[in-house]
Amino acid sequence: MIRTENLSVGYGKTPLIEDICLRLRPGQVVTLIGPNGSGKSTILKTVIGQLAPIRGMVFLDGRAMGALSPLEIAQKLAVLMTGRVRPELMTCWDVAAMGRCPYTRRLGILSAGDREKVWEALSLVHGEELAPLPFTEISDGQRQRVMLARALCQEPEVIVLDEPTTFLDIRYKLELLAVLKEMAQERKLAVLLSLHELELAEKISDCVVCVHNGKIERIGPPEEIFTADYIKKLFDIQTDDSELFVFRGGKHLRCGRTTGTCAALAAQGAARLLLTGQIPASAALTTPKGTRIEAPLEGCRLEDGSAFCSVRKDGGDDIDDTHGLLITAQVERWDAPGVSIEGGAGVGRVTKPGLDQSVGAAAINRVPRRMIEQEVLSVADELGYEGGFQVTIHVPGGEEAAKKTFNPQMGIEGGISILGTSGIVEPMSAQALIDTIALEIRQRAAQGHKKIILTPGNYGLDFLRAQGMDRWGVPVVKCSNFIGDALDACAAEQIQGVLLVGHMGKLVKLAGGVMNTHSRSADCRTELFCAHAALRGAGREVCQALADCSTSDACIAVLDRAGLRETVLDSLLSAIQDHLDRRVSGTIHVGAVVFSNQYGLLGRTRRAGELIDRWK
Amino acid sequence: MGLLALLAALNLKVGSVRQADEAIVWRLRAPRMLAAAILGGGLSLSGFLLQTFFANPIAGPFVLGISSGAKLAVSLTMIFLLSRGLVSTSAAMIGAAFLGAMLSMGFILLISRRVRRMSLLVVCGVMIGYICSAITDFVLTFAEDSNIVNLHNWSMGSFSGIYWDSVGVIALVTGAALVLAFLLSKPIGAYQLGEVYARSMGVDIRLFRVELILLSSLLSACVTAFAGPVSFVGIAVPHLMKRLFGTAKPLLMIPACFLGGGAFCLFCDLVARVVFAPREMSISSVTALLGAPVVITMLAGRRRERD
């Protein structure tokens, strides 16, 4: 649709960016990214003919732009540029209707067909209700949507947008881009835009163009461009200890490292110190999620054959109770090969069953254990050491900090837990998460899906895979803890059947009508087990045992011993079904499947059975 | 709107006839009334076009110094021709005024490239106006006495002394400009969203800008040539019309501004002629007295909107 050949652009005579060769095909979304002032807008202005190219050519539909009349261009190419428009006394409808200009006759009077197209374009941007309002009296975000409707009215084959998301809040950003993506796919519209939100660029683009240092530095599909290393280079982000960023809610939030990552980094440094006798300046590792993390080492010393190194916990912009603690690894040689990992002062100890580690073990979860082992062994490998290691993790001040965490309720005593499965802490605001979930559901609905499987997280995905449910062709949407919001979104999009698949520990809360299952929001798991067990004839002792449990798995074990598992689960599941039905007010069929990592499938609600039989 | 114009016309014709005979009405007042209506319309339309062009609600032929430029050129021409003992024709007057208007416009365009702030542009326009007025006064000082009275009257702005032959020319020029402006409704509407969007919606910007400049200059030149500089009509009337109709759509605004301007000038001329009769006020004094408050309230209102 659009092609540039050896294009050089800039203001005046000096080129700002040279040798631009872009290609835009129908149905493609191409996004320009790059730091401010890199020339994204200049390129776009040249492509739409607002600036004359310094060298080279722009072709529209195979013909040189210069040879086309303004009218011919207008029927093929629509634009949405930055800069506010303040037309006097125009309603939103008037503004949108301006898009019909290239098609109306001399005086610009709209025909019935034109009017229909204006309404259609307004409905595409969900702007029908804006139509009668004065354009200058609506919000920036609404204005942007109306301007987009105007561009769509032009029935273009190409649409060029310069930072269209600038004034929008996250919900409308997602919505605007969803509209563009949809138009690209359905109407074979070619979309060329610049964005400064990288996570949005990654989501929407078929092809990403990186503008940097006076040239197009890279062009490629998003998965090739969005590597942490390259993005840092592109935006000249200076980092001493490789800091990571995520873009959430339009903000640039700094990622932190989990306690597990800190422990593994410290262990790596200590092992190196132990084997070489030299103090390493920093340690680096690749997290299970594949990002590289580097951190400075503190308090490195050798003492009686033990090496000590510490790394400071950093929650990034997601400050939690463990932020700022030093995680120290003490590493000693061990005669037998292999790595033994222990928890020292400040690291909690498991006192109740049902957690990641067994009773009596240090509260260092599986993934961090594996990371620590991997790091020290790789150091040993590198330095040709063939013996084993004894690694002890200490957290000075950990016992104090742990009192503010959920550890006491979980049955972890004496310190914090060393945990984290991905290795990095990605901060995210709740509203942004809910918006993202709702958007994903909307997109599924837009693709014509009438069924959806919701699952809170990765456990659920693993379970679906293990059960073969991911092969049913029903889209799976991760809804995190926002089960109520996800159901609302499904109801709003007129999804007909929703199957909720989740871990007992989360979904049992639904039996009490708690629809945000985050432990900060509410925790009534044992209470619910207790209440339903009592209803089904459990004695005081059983109820007491349930009340003492720290996890739902432990509750199941208690019920098993009392021979009450079936009947109590039935009772809980029917309560879950009732609350689900109430939330959606019977508008959609919704059922739940409950499992646990320890026991596998635990049960399903009445509706879930029906849905599964139908969907299989 | 047509009704309003008719009303004003009747008002004018009847209001001050008294015992005067029909010949006076026919030979003096009828052409004067028609000229006031048409020129008022032209002035207001010229204001509307300039406001669109500069995307600025206080742009107008008087404020931007275009009327004064035309005035200067006309004075020079008049003095030159009279000193040679020639009678100046309508065509020569319009030609000179157009030239003067274009010169002022050229200056304004040059300045508008440098300054982005619209308030500055207006200040520059006012300055140009003062310079032109100063030169005009200077020239008048050296003109022969017999010409001065005539010239002085004219340079204050007045619809008196316009006869039937001039009305024909006025109607022809203004009418042509009105039709041409009406045919530009669509690009004018698109231009209200800004140059970038207008271009992207198929408007040939370069051609359109030239057309707009020529038309607005022609209109204000025509007014100046016959009635001298008339202030504030170009700003106040389009603003009043936009408020009245609650829209800025050129398809409606172009005829509305024309008719509204006509009615406004008829009324002002009536006031100028009748209030202190038999003495006449200059038309510019009356339009300023009535128009300036409108402009001030408009500016105050805009400031409030923005805050």
Image: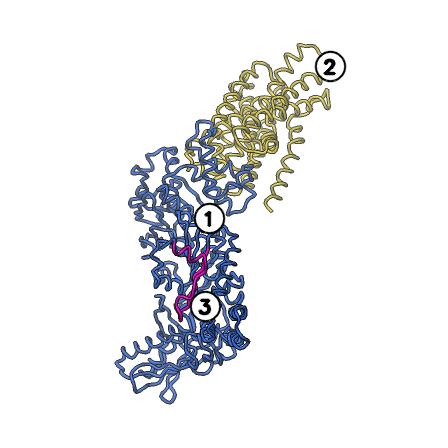
Chain colours: A blue, B yellow
Q: Label 1 sits on what residue type?
A: Gln
Q: Which label belongs to residue A566?
A: 3
Q: Is residue B53 magenta?
A: no
- Name which quarter of the figure residue A274 lies in: bottom left
Q: Which label belongs to residue A371?
A: none
B257 above or below A567? Answer: above
Give coordinates of residue A550: x percent, y percent.
49, 74
Q: Label 3 sits on what residue type?
A: Glu
Q: For this view, does A556 lie left or right of residue A280? A: right
Identify the residue shown where x is 46% and y is 83%. A345
Q: Label 2 sits on what residue type?
A: Arg
Disc with the residue nearer the chain's start (3 vs 1):
1
Q: Which label belongs to residue A494?
A: 1
Number of numbered discs on residues: 3
The residue indicated by pointer 2 is B18
Q: Nearer the viewer, mark 1 or mark 2?
A: 1
Q: For this view, does A24 lie left or right of residue B54? A: left
Please report the bounds of the magenta region as a residue range.
A590-613
